[in-house]
Amino acid sequence: MRTQVGIIGAGPAGLLLSHILHLRGIDSVVLERRDRAYVESRVRAGVLEQGTVNLLVEVGLGERLLREGLQHHGIEIRSGTRSHRIDFDELTGGKGITVYGQQEVIKDLIAARLAAQGRLLFEVDEVSIRGALSENPSIQFKSGGKEQGLDCDFIAGCDGFHGVSRESIPAEAITCFDRTYPFAWLGILVDAPPSSSELIYSNSPDGFALHSMRSPAISRNYIQCPPEDRIEDWPDERIWKALHTRLETVPGWTLDEGGILEKSITPMRSFVCETMRYGRLVLAGDAAHIVPPTGAKGMNLAISDVNMLSRALADWYENGSDELLRAYPENCLRQVWRRVHFSWYMTSLLHKFPEQGEFERKLQLAELEHLSQSQAASAALAENYVGH
Ligand SMILES: Cc1cc2nc3c(=O)[nH]c(=O)nc-3n(C[C@H](O)[C@H](O)[C@H](O)COP(=O)(O)OP(=O)(O)OC[C@H]3O[C@@H](n4cnc5c(N)ncnc54)[C@H](O)[C@@H]3O)c2cc1C
């Protein structure tokens, strides 16, 4: 089998890259380890920056997003009995965010690729990369139990943090930066309308909680928990008790309960691989970097990488220039580190750190008070949250 760009991974990065390349007349094949039903139902991100929405609309993926996505004009930050609203309209000159589940973005992308006869191979196994430093790299894999090879001009490693692409780069050619946080997020999908029209981030003495939503009928809540916790440690009763305690800190506001549809535990980590290109192998999205979800940046970053990568590949095919490809890591990493910093800031501001003493707690409270009293501080948070 042959294609121009072989793409490993059918997450937001891989599928969007394939879609944009198709619009530019460049052929690609997407290889995905899981089956279609699994990738279309995997519950993860849900907050799209303004720039992400603009790009998806520009490439023809806006129809359902604009109809069903929930536009938000602010978020609320709670600390003790205090509440502070970050007003995006006022602080960013009218920018906002859209709440639209990652699995909905995936469904739209798969539908668009299949409608254009795009080649998506699900349930492939034993994927490996050959000849990344040559002009004829290839991907070896098993599909339906048979060994196959995919010859390409370029390989895009869009296979997430645990994929094979980054692992294929020799250790001596790679530089990574890593921070593991001493807590995780327990995520709960609830069959109940959201209790607030905007996201509520709460820094409570018991630990962080977030009230969010996926649609007018489905809420999404998160609870800070120890990283070693398992789902069995969190029966429904314990979850609701923690959510009520951590979120109902403002007089008169109550959280509505509902049937719990899904529970998952996500470790919290910041990771950046500064080697985003190794010969003809390029990395995009979580394969190259991950951020803790507190700033809602992971999928947005994956999409911003792909936007740059598709331009670089188009420039190579259309103009024979490798200038944008050579500049791809540097151009991406500027945006990556900005968002890594913001995600770290939000995480540090809102969570209870196990080793936190009185001094660190006072610093956190001072920063939260500063946010509520300084328009400049709120504007900086708003600008980062909606995206530059
Ligand atoms: C609880 C939670 C909440 C989040 N909230 C937000 C948010 O609000 N906003 C936001 O922007 N981001 C958020 N994120 C982050 C976001 O989900 C990720 O950053 C995003 O999925 C990255 O997309 P990707 O395409 O790079 O990688 P992935 O989505 O991980 O896709 C990689 C794909 O590659 C496949 N794959 C892996 N290995 C192989 C292999 N060897 N061969 C073939 N295929 C392979 C995987 O099955 C997967 O389909 C959140 C994440 C979590 C866990």
Image: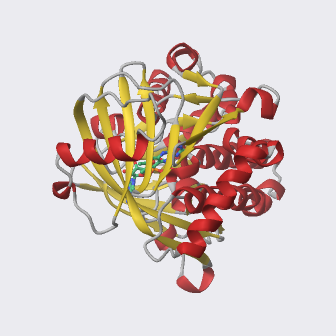
* Residue 237 vertical placement versus 110 (above, below): below
Q: Quadrant of residue 322?
A: bottom right
Q: Nearer the viewer, residue 299 or 356?
A: 356
In the displayed structure image, the side of residue 69 where residue 34 appears, left or right = left
In the displayed structure image, the side of residue 331 where residue 242 appears, left or right = left
In the displayed structure image, the side of residue 380 where residue 288 appears, left or right = left
Q: In the image, what residue occupies the spot 35% across and 46% down? A: 245
Visible residue check, residue 104: yes
Q: Quadrant of residue 96?
A: top right
Q: Quadrant of residue 125?
A: bottom left
Q: Nearer the viewer, residue 54 or 125?
A: 54
* Residue 129 vertical placement versus 210 (above, below): below
Find residue 160 and report its horizontal and vertical position in percent. 46, 56
Q: In the image, what residue occupies the spot 35% across and 58% down? A: 141
Find residue 73 and report its horizontal and vertical position in percent. 66, 26
* Residue 73 vertical placement versus 158 (above, below): above
